[in-house]
Image (cartoon, rainbow, N blue to C red):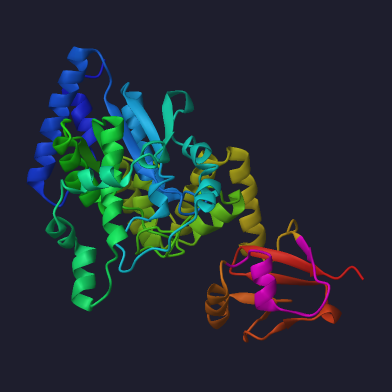
Amino acid sequence: MVSIDEQVEILMSGAEYGDPETKVTMARELRERLIEAEEAGRPLRVYCGYDPRKPDLHLGHTITMRKLRQFQELGHDVTFLIGTFTSLIGDPSDKDKARNQLTVDEVRENARTYAEQAFKILDPDLTRVRYNDEWLSTLDFADIIRLASNFTVQQFLVRENFANRIRDGLPIYLHEFFYALMQAYDAVAQEADVQVGGQDQLFNIVVAGRKLQQGLGQKPQIAIIMGESLPGTDGHEKMSKSQGNHIPLLGEPWDMYGKVMSIPDVAMPIYYKLILGWTPAQLSEFEHALKDGSLHPNEAKMRLAREIVSIFHSPDDAVSAQQRWDEVFRSKGGPGIPTDIPTATIEADERVVDVLRRLNMVASGKEAARLIEQGGIRLADQPVTELSALVRVVDLPAVLQVGKRKFVKLINED
């Protein structure tokens, strides 16, 4: 049986608060809560929330999921909370402008596969899945006033992103204050002992959540704030769907493999650490091998890509993705075209940009314009250089390529 001291060491590993004193406080409170729970013969109530602003979770989300998995393996009660109500506002944390508001239908559709994606990491038999509209949608205006009375405006305005907006003369909308209030109420509604989150959730969890619980007569939750964030495919910025540098868990195996292969060499160690769970000793040996040349960066990255695809899909998918990568990028003749690409029918001359959007090969016209400017779109193996460029029926069949991994064969059946 794992001792309480050992549990504290395991569960606090990787947690950072930007303040050593806060970390000491959280570790002490976690130990005290573990003792209380053991004496009461119950597990800790632990959760982490995920807002379905988009339909897919990404590799960056799995950092907090792995911490939840540690709690599960130590016998605690873990809830995977889907923010079906908080998503209607959108978390303003680390944002320099207000988020677009979603509709109820959009949120429900986005949330449809969240639990299935989470079970790539979490044990489905040990995971409680809940939706926060269960309690937040029942609050009336009097409830909101009562909850809000636990906070001051000054407490919110000192948040860095709000302070920056005030400095820059940018608006802060009143509804954005409600997000932290609603997330704090999540902790109250679940009588949470522990909430796990990333650095961007420091205020929501440590300040708002704990303060509201205390104000309503509960013991304040322990915050486990993960210290490191996974960089996106650019190797620098935090992985984010809004930045477009994410690797979605729902991505096709070959696309996931290709996105991992696109990360800069310098980002590999943190992927090995945060996604594969390598120890400091393993990482030290790995970095030494890269430095002395005994391990080629490309081989290290292919190993990483295979491991990640195996985790989130299957070993067979990893083998197929590797073969497709080799076919396209490692053939003797240089980059090629896979043999299993999809086919789409073009019935009349159409702008390349419109084809890309219709086939969901780009997220927006803006993304298409950026890719064209960067030389990232090719038609019939020739770069597309103008937004007005056409796919002409008389030139079909032809392969349309976006970036290094997206292909479609365009045909006309007439």
Q: Residue furthest right?
A: 414
| Residue 304 sits above or below residue 410 on the image | above
Residue 406 is left or right of residue 348, and the answer is left
- Residue 218 in sight from this viewpoint: yes
Image coordinates for residue 130, horizontal then vertical, percent: 42, 34
- Residue at the spot 73% in from the left edge and 59% down from the top edge: 341
Rendered image quadrant of residue 325: bottom right
| Residue 377 sits above or below residue 288 on the image | below
Tell me the quarter of the image containing the N terminus.
top left
Rendered image quadrant of residue 349: bottom right
Q: Residue furthest front?
A: 142
Q: Nearer the viewer, residue 45 or 23?
A: 45
| Residue 412 sits above or below residue 84 on the image | below
Residue 208 is left or right of residue 54, and the answer is left
Q: Is residue 151 magenta?
A: no
* Number of numbered discs on residues: 0
Tell me the quarter of the image containing the C terminus.
bottom right
Image coordinates for residue 77, horizontal then vertical, percent: 34, 25
Q: Is residue 353 magenta?
A: yes
- Residue at the spot 63% in from the left edge and 65% down from the top edge: 361
- Residue 93 in sight from this viewpoint: no
Q: Nearer the viewer, residue 339 or 12?
A: 12
Residue 85 is left or right of residue 262, and the answer is left
Residue 264 is left or right of residue 193, and the answer is right
Magenta stretch, residue numbers = 343-362
Rendered image quadrant of residue 241: bottom left
Image coordinates for residue 2, horizontal then vertical, percent: 24, 19
- Residue at the spot 37% in from the left edge and 32% down from the top edge: 79
Q: Nearer the viewer, residue 78 or 252?
A: 78
Image coordinates for residue 46, horizontal then vertical, percent: 30, 31
